[in-house]
Amino acid sequence: MSFFKRLRESIASKTEAVTSKFKEGLAKTRSLLTDRVAELFTRRSKIDEAFFEELEEILIGADVGVNTVMELIDDLRDEVKKRKIDQPAELQPILSEKLMDMLRGSGEDAALKTNPDGITVILFVGVNGVGKTTTIGKLAWRFKQQGKTVLMAAGDTFRAGAIEQLEVWGQRTGVDVIRQEAGSDPAAVMFDAVQEAKRRGVDVLLCDTAGRLQNKANLMEELAKIHRVIQREIPGAPHETLLVLDAATGQNALQQAKLFGEKSGVTGLVLTKLDGTAKGGIVIAIRNEMALPVKFVGLGEKMDDLQEFDAEQFVHALFAGLAGNPEETEEN
Amino acid sequence: MAFEGLTSRLQNVFGKLRGRGKLTEEDVNEAMREVRLALLEADVNFKVVKDFIAKVKEKAVGQEVMKSFTPAMVVIDIVNKELTELMGGTQAKLVKANKPPTVVLMAGLQGAGKTTLTGKLANLLKKENQKPLLVAGDIYRPAAIKQLEVLGGQIGVPVFTLGDQVSPVEIAKQGVQKAKDEGLDYVLIDTAGRLQIDEALMEEIKQIHDAVDPDEVLLVVDAMTGQEAVNVAQSFHEKLALTGVVLTKLDGDTRGGAALSVKAVTGCPIKFASTGEKIDQLEAFHPDRMASRILGMGDMLSLIEKAQAGIDAEKAAEMERKMRTAEFTLEDFLEQMEQVRKMGPLDQLLDMMPGMGKLKSMPNFKVDEKQIARTEAIVKSMTRQEKLKPELINFSRRKRIAAGSGTTVADVNRLLRQFEDMKKMMKQFSGLMGPGGKGPKGGMKALKQMLGKGGKGGMKFPF
């Protein structure tokens, strides 16, 4: 059975769970990347240096990390030699499969980890302006919809207006915010929030932190301290530390994943602003090099514009244009 | 995974071909592959890279390789010059309208740093004795108005707001009118972040633009932006006719290739670079420095400038003499440390030195500001005699010094040992530099040696 047939069937069997929002949000990503890929595969009639070069450019243009792209292209070159392929169309499924494998990783860590017998603590980290506070607001709404009790901790005591921003989200979603004055020690805010969460016996505690660039040693130490305080007050917490990434970020995202990982034990990614034309391809590189899964994607500014990341949906949406005509692919 | 600087990359490429007179086309092609990778890793848009490489290739073929230069240096020189030129001259000035107020409109994606930048720019203008007005035009993001109000409060600049229920077009119009009525010099209009494909919001900012007819339209771009920078810049430029660009978050470890992409697409000068979260951390943009940063060659120029600003020239000359003659005492050591600290946080300084970024990522290498403070405390706990003649320091003195500085005898021992090592090293250098040795050149050589040793794990910082 061809790769695309399998893919199609596995997707069909998943009912129509592919939400329209997800599709819509990804439409731009999809059309830009896949149209170009599809076009490349049909236009080119033979596999030569120019073909590889163009493929490389398309992938790099999607921010799929230079190293990862080089690896991928090298692999494809080997496949071409090994299988004696000379038609680009034959290479197409191999490329798709490789990308899928990269995105999926082992595939077991995709779901959000929760604490079955107590408070689930989720810590949000990331550089400035990626959308941490917004993501927390959306996630609070999401948990609320699931009938969970939620509390938010205003850990960004640095940026002007950050506490107020979270409070607005609190009002919108009907979730309480634990806060102190601007400029206070964020670790102390976390301590308070954890105590309050325990006292109320809430299901989920969402912890905001100030945006920080990963090369600022002192700010990264502050983050490590926040992490320690939470860990000390609730053993096993935070159950997830999510690195929030702006989909428009380039190669620097790898550096972010690495350094935030070292200081705060990042367990997953949230990819925001994917409703733009930014392709967010760097998550493929991060998944490939650091085995960090994407847990959520942000697709807009409204409360329900946060979707669980489903690698299969993502790839399906990404390659919809290709999977649509498997017969042609086979004929070639 | 860490980025390798272009310098070392090209040196690898050219390692085998020393002593050639001219660069052949083949040499250049080989080098250009590395240049291309370096630029792509720095997030320069692939189309921009392509054009750039084609241009450089033409210039590089047939270049004479001078005796004093390796082929790698020749290529880097060409690339660097082209890159600098492409990024344009320094124009770190806001335009000033003939008839005040000068209207400045901010535009950009969400999270680029518009509101913070608006505050910083107002601060800068205020320092130049101008009277700015901040206009809170972001009615969408929760607490964006509040954020601008806090910033305005910090720097003592008025903020004009009509709350978040009035259209931003109206807010902007009334804001400009208010500035006119009160005879203010500048109006800085903050706007909500928007995706360049969001037609409704792009139309809105166009209307703001048409309503206030700004003298300056600044696109605020996150320096970490990837390939997308091109699309963003293009769309905003088409809609608003940008007059300048501001790069934010340049204090991160991104190579910032987006700068080149944006410049190539819009042709607008990059007017400012934002380099920190504090309100005064806004700097003029330097194309040459950005060029070497994109190429991964560190930021030696900034470092030299910082050193010039921070270090007393006379003291430096005296210090150099002492180092040369190995008359260096602990007292000098202390003074030198203070001078270095004046230049800024040590890890930032290291970032600016070529190759040092790599050193920093080594597991055993850590810059600990606290450690420097401890070292200072130890030296300060010594008597003057002890500082001049460390060999005087016996065990009981060590105990006293440790107690005085709140450290342990082991710490004191370590410091003294490191100081001795350092002195030995200096003696070796003094031979290298020679009595009349020209400062900077010899100094660089010495530094290189130190760094070379560092590679083998032999170098210890005295602090």
Image (cartoon, grey):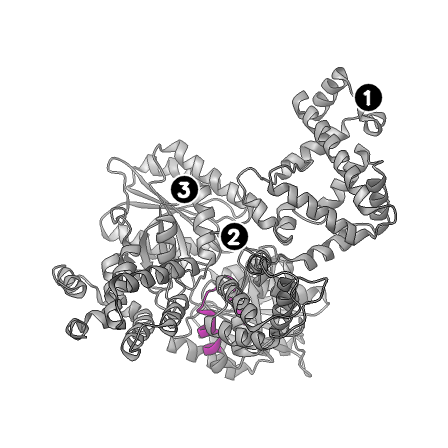
Mark 2 crowd level (few <14, some 14–19, many ≥20, 10 Å Cα): many
Q: Which mark is residue B392?
A: 1
Which quadrant holds the C terminus of chain A?
bottom left
The amino acid at mark 2 is Leu
Task: Work out whether residue A304 can be spotted.
Answer: no
The amino acid at mark 1 is Leu
- Distance between the alpha carbons at the discs numbered 1 and 2: 46 Å
In the rendered structure, which segment of residues is drawn in magenta? B217-236
Along the line of sight, which residue is nearer the eye, B238 or A288? A288
Q: Is residue A329 left or right of residue B271?
A: left
The residue that appears at 76% across and 34% down in the rendered structure is: B424
Mark 3 = which residue?
A265
Foreground mark, 1 or 2? Answer: 1
Which quadrant holds the N terminus of chain A?
bottom left
Location of residue B360 by image quarter = top right
Secondary structure beneath label 1: helix
